[in-house]
Image (tube, rainbow, N blue to C red):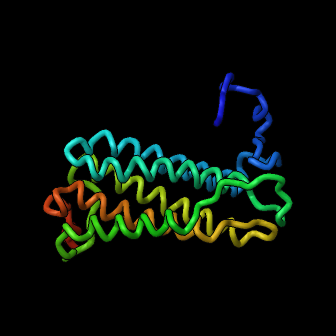
Amino acid sequence: MIKLDRIYTRGGDRGETSLGDGQRRLKCNLRIDAFGTIDEANSAIGLARLSTGGQPELDAMLARIQNDLFDLGADLCTPDAAGKLKFEPLRIVQSQVDRLEHEIDTLNEGLGPLLSFVLPGGSPAAAALHLARTIARRAERLMVALSRQPGETVNEPALRYINRLSDLLFVASRAANQNGAGDVLWKPGQTR
């Protein structure tokens, strides 16, 4: 269990922070940017949950995802330096990816087919879920870039998880929009 007695430590006053394995990295480091963006997506999901009052199943799903995103942050915060860690780090596992896929399928069952691209909006919950989706996509881009850096590793299930998450947030936004009935559809060229 984590215990925080003090919120500030002054350890980052010179633009560095510590990873879970004790390494110090600049706060502008790609790994820090990746798990910081995961935190941002988590916050956007928290905002979306404020508007899902009439959909307890959706809210419970989003609550599980918020917890997973802390797991994902912990995963990214503790790189595997060639297996030299003296403890078993928390990692995203395939069963978390599988659960997302199941939840995507469950949400998608109640949705009609798409006849156009969906614009972010409709209900407050849907708009917030679209925002969370775009932040998750940015996190995914950062994680992929990190995984391509020499000497850096990213857990494969973590990459699959973040990819599925943006898909889930898309179908969740449609579910929040009265199962798609409240979707705002793109009308190509309408404003020319």
What is the total number of numbered labels drawn onto the structure image? 0
- Relative placement, left or right, of 123 versus 78 is left
Image quadrant where residue 186 sits: bottom left
Specify whether residue 182 is in view: yes
- Relative placement, left or right, of 107 versus 11 is left
- Could you tell me residue 134's position as x and y percent? 43, 59
Check the picture and name the quadrant holding the C terminus: bottom left
- Could you tell me residue 99's position as x and y percent? 43, 65
- Could you tell me residue 18's position as x and y percent? 77, 43
Q: Residue furthest left?
A: 181
- Could you tell me residue 153's position as x and y percent? 73, 67
Q: Residue furthest right?
A: 84
Along the line of sight, which residue is nearer the eye, 175 or 106? 106
Q: Which residue is rendered at x = 69% and y = 57% of the image?
A: 30
Q: Which residue is rendered at x = 38% and y = 51% of the image?
A: 62
Q: Residue furthest top?
A: 5
Along the line of sight, which residue is nearer the eye, 61 or 171? 61
Along the line of sight, which residue is nearer the eye, 154 or 87? 87
Q: Is residue 25 above or below residue 108?
A: above
- Relative placement, left or right, of 164 versus 52 is right
- Relative placement, left or right, of 153 versus 41 is right
Specify whether residue 192 is in view: no
Along the line of sight, which residue is nearer the eye, 131 or 76? 76
Check the picture and name the quadrant holding the N terminus: top right
Q: Which residue is rendered at x = 32% and y = 47% of the image?
A: 59
Q: Which residue is rendered at x = 68% and y = 23% of the image?
A: 6
